[in-house]
């Protein structure tokens, strides 16, 4: 009897142990299922983030494409407008003229390129409010003939077009805002990119807006733009310029600059 009871208890213990093992297996299986669900949720979350990033990139590319298309349409519209205007002062070509090489007028947006250009053309101060969106061509009559100037807009989308014209330019006029201290490093970088593309192109720098109280003196502009590094083989001139009241005569320094530009253009041709 005792031996039978002992066997029975041992059997019950084995059964209990088996139940515990089974329970442990079930708990382990449940933990795996929970972990698998967590992994799936994390994966789903990551996929959503990746889809959102792809969507944002696609939207950005689409936006950039629309902007590029808009710029091209602007250029096209400007070209058509230039063809329809009966004027010898302003046109907006997309290709440089082959017969007459052009004097390039470049610089950052807001430097006063258009105002300087039209004032040189008329010998009277003409302020321009709207920035040039694309190209602006101006013909200036001289005693010896005509000079054709080509201004290219100074905002970021248009600067890349400058290098296309540098190889065919007579000389480069670079206009800088003497009072915009924060953008002088940007102006320096742009200028040195331009002169690197044509190592012998004569350079005339207009340190513009000298009438403003915060304007740097031309010696400071010379240093800020590192003009001493433009190269010994290049003709380089620096003028301090300003435009005051609309309709008034251009300052003597601008007249001197105009005479010099005409002489340089004649020498190059």
Image (tube, rainbow, N blue to C red):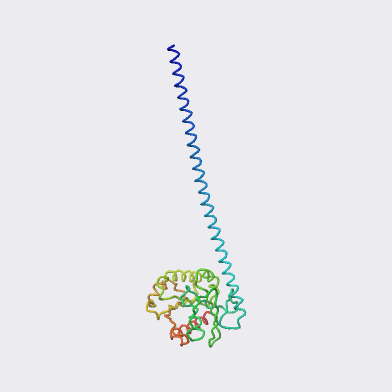
Where is residue 55 shown, x and y percent of the image? Answer: 55, 56
Residue 17 or residue 93, whichever sits in front: 17
User: Residue at position x 52%, y 73% from top?
Assistant: 153
Where is residue 130 shown, x and y percent of the image? Answer: 50, 77
Residue 66 or residue 83, whichever sits in front: 66
**Total label count?**
0
Q: In this view, does 248 lie to the left or right of 213?
A: right
The quarter in which the N terminus is drawn is top left
In which quarter of the view is residue 77 placed?
bottom right
Where is residue 178 shown, x and y percent of the image? Answer: 41, 76
User: Residue at position x 37%, y 79% from top?
Assistant: 213
Q: Residue 217, relative to residue 20: is it above or below?
A: below
The quarter in which the C terminus is drawn is bottom right
Q: Residue 47, relative to residue 17: is it above or below?
A: below
Where is residue 177 shown, x and y percent of the image? Answer: 43, 75
């Amino acid at each position: 009897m005792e031996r039978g009871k002992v066997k029975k208890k041992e059997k019950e213990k084995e059964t209990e142990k088996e139940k515990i093992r089974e329970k442990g297996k079930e708990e382990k299986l449940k933990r795996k299922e929970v972990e698998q669900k967590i992994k799936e949720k994390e994966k789903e979350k990551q996929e959503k983030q990746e889809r959102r990033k792809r969507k944002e990139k696609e939207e950005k590319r689409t936006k950039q494409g629309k902007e590029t298309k808009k710029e091209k349409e602007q250029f096209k519209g400007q070209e058509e407008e230039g063809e329809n205007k009966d004027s010898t002062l302003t046109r907006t070509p997309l290709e440089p003229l082959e017969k007459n090489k052009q004097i390039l007028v470049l610089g950052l947006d807001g430097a006063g390129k258009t105002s300087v250009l039209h004032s040189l053309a008329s010998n009277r101060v003409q302020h321009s409010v709207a920035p040039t969106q694309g190209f602006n061509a101006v013909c200036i009559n001289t005693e010896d003939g005509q000079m054709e100037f080509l201004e290219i807009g100074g905002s970021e989308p248009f600067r890349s077009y400058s290098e296309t014209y540098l190889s065919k330019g007579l000389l480069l006029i670079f206009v800088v805002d003497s009072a915009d201290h924060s953008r002088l490093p940007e102006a320096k970088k742009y200028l040195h990119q331009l002169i690197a593309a044509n190592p012998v192109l004569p350079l005339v720098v207009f340190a513009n807006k000298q009438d403003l109280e915060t304007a740097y003196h031309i010696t400071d502009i010379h240093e800020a733009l590192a003009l001493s590094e433009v190269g010994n083989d290049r003709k380089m001139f620096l003028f301090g310029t300003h435009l005051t009241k609309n309709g008034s005569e251009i300052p003597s320094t601008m007249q001197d600059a105009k005479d010099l530009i005409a002489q340089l253009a004649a020498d190059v041709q």
